[in-house]
Amino acid sequence: MISIEKFNLFVLIWIGIAVLIFPVTLFITAPYGRHSKSTWGPMINNRVAWILMEIPALLLFVWMVIEARGLSNLVVVIASFLWTAHYIHRSIIFPLRIKTAKKKMPILIMLFAVCFNFVNGFINGYWLGNFASYTNDWIFDLRFILGVIFFISGFIINKYHDKILIGLRKNSTNGYQIPFGGLFRFISCPNFLGEIIEWVGFALLTWSLPSLAFLVWTFINLVPRALDHHKWYKSKFPEYPINRNAILPGIF
C-alpha cells in the first residue's frame, strides 16, 4: 500500500503539472473535433477514440474502490455512484450518440487523454478506497450537500446542452450550426461549464486532494477548449451573437 505522504506528494506534483501546462493550452488548440488535423500523426475513428480514452477513468476507479474496501461506506458509495454515472455516460452513451461517423482523431491526442483519465481515475479511486475515513454524519455536512447539488446540476447542464449540439447535426450539411437554447443564450460552451460545475461539486462532497486535482485539470482542459470553440464560432459564422461569452456569462 502506498503511504499517505507519498500519495499526497504524487497528487501535488500532478496539480503542479496542470498549472505549468495551462499557459501552453491557451496557445495550442488540441486537434480533435471541429479542430481536428491530420498533421498530428496517425488517426483513429472518433467514436472509438472517445470510448478508449474515457473508459480507463471508469474501470480503474471502480476497481480501486471495490478492491480496497468494497462498498461498505455510505459516503464512498454515493461518491462512487456519481463518478460512475458520469463516466458511463461519457465513455459509452455519449460516444454512441454523437453523429461523427466519418470524423477521426489523432491517436496521439487519444493517448494523452488515456494517460489523463488513468491518473485521475487512479488517484480518486485509490484515495476513496484506501484513505477516506468518512462517517455517516458527513452526508449532513454543508460541503457534502452543496457538492451533491452542484454535481447533479452540472450533470444536467452538461447533458442537456450536449443534446442540443448532437441534435444540430441532423439538419446540417457540414455538421455545424449556431446552437441556441438554454445557456447558449449567454455562452458558447455551456456543456463545458456544466462539466466544470460537476467536478466543483465532487471536490466539495469528497473534500479531498485528488478531487481538487481533477477539478484543476478539468479547468485547464476545458477553459482553453471553450475559448477555441468561441473563436471558431465567430470566424465561421459572421452572424454569431456578439453578446455571447466563451464559458462564463458576462466574464469570458
Image: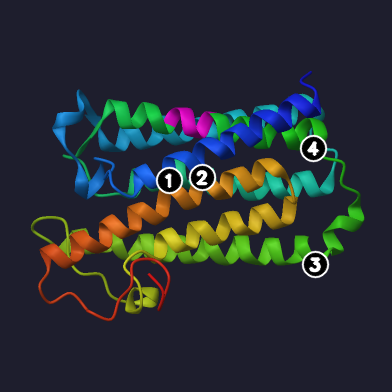
Secondary structure type for disc 4: loop
Q: Nearer the viewer, residue 63 or 236?
A: 236
Where's residue 56, x and y in %? 51, 30
Residue type at tag 3: Leu
Residue type at tag 4: Leu
Say whether disc 4 or disc 3 marks the residue closer to the N-terminus.
4
Secondary structure type for disc 2: helix
Image quarter in which the C terminus is found: bottom left
Mark 4 vs 2: CB contact within 8 A? no
Residue 21 against residue 98 in the figure, above or below: above
Residue type at tag 1: Phe
Q: Quadrant of residue 114?
A: top left
Mark 1 vs 4: CB contact within 8 A? no
Q: Which residues are magenta?
A: 114-118
Say whether disc 3 or disc 1 marks the residue closer to the N-terminus.
1
Q: Nearer the viewer, residue 55 or 227?
A: 227
Secondary structure type for disc 1: helix
Say whether disc 4 or disc 2 marks the residue closer to the N-terminus.
4
Say whether disc 1 or disc 4 marks the residue closer to the N-terminus.
1
- On the image, numbered disc 1 is attached to which residue? 22
Which tag is nearer the camera, tag 4 or tag 3?
3
Q: 245 left or right of 8?
A: left
Q: 69 left or right of 180?
A: right
Which tag is nearer the camera, tag 2 or tag 3?
2
